[in-house]
Amino acid sequence: QKPVIENFVHNLQAKTAADFKLAIATTEGTYFIPAQDILRLEADGSYTRFFLITGKKMMASRTMKDFADLLDETQFIRVHKSHVVNKRYVKSIHNNHVLVMEDNSVVEVSRRKWDEVKEQIRM
């Protein structure tokens, strides 16, 4: 637990959003990932799958909501009950309610959130 506590203290002292690191506990260990390195999150029941800009994928045994609540709302947007994306890495937005990310992955946008997502992505 010591690394998690140290990460918590680090985040309390972070002066900017760029200094923030998310602690992601996996079966391999706990990783401290800068928020800007996160491409997107995907819910899988009570688990969360992380997709990093490096191409690495991780699975954490916490809900996506737990993580989404920690991420900066100016950088991340929940586009669907199962998807949170980093707005920085949205490559294109399509009228069939999908986003294409920098890694060419396709993310569905819920109809309920469509107008809000379009507005925030185009900012």
Image: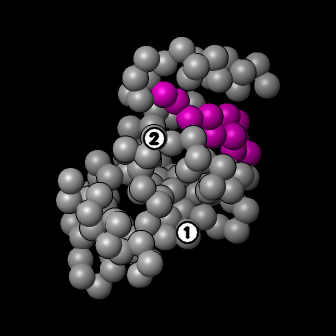
Q: Residue 38's image quarter?
A: top left
Secondary element at tag 2: loop
Magenta span: 20-31
Secondary element at tag 1: loop
- Residue 123, above or below 35: below
Tag in front: 1 or 2: 2
Counting from the top left corner in percent of width and height, residue 39 is at 40, 51
In the rendered image, residue 29 lying in the magenta stretch gets the answer yes
Callout 2 environment at 10 Å: few (<14), some (14 to 19), or many (20+)? Answer: some
Tell me which residue sits at (38%, 38%) in the image: 36
Instruction: Residue 114: give its label.
Output: none
**Amino acid type for the residue under numbered disc 2:** Asp
Counting from the top left corner in percent of width and height, residue 84 is at 47, 59
Q: Nearer the viewer, residue 66 or 100?
A: 66
Q: Residue 24's image quarter?
A: top right
Counting from the top left corner in percent of width and height, residue 109 is at 40, 74
Q: Which residue is mark 2?
A: 72
Q: First in sequence, mark 1 or 2: give its number.
A: 2
**Amino acid type for the residue under numbered disc 1:** Ser
Q: Which residue is mark 1?
A: 82
Callout 1 environment at 10 Å: few (<14), some (14 to 19), or many (20+)? Answer: some
The answer to whether residue 105 shows anywhere in this view is yes
In the rendered image, residue 84 lying in the magenta stretch gets the answer no
Mark 1–mark 2 distance (CA, rounded to whole Å): 18 Å
Tell me which residue sits at (48%, 18%) in the image: 14
Q: Residue 4's image quarter?
A: top right
Left or right position of 43 against 54: right
Q: Quadrant of the N terminus?
A: top right
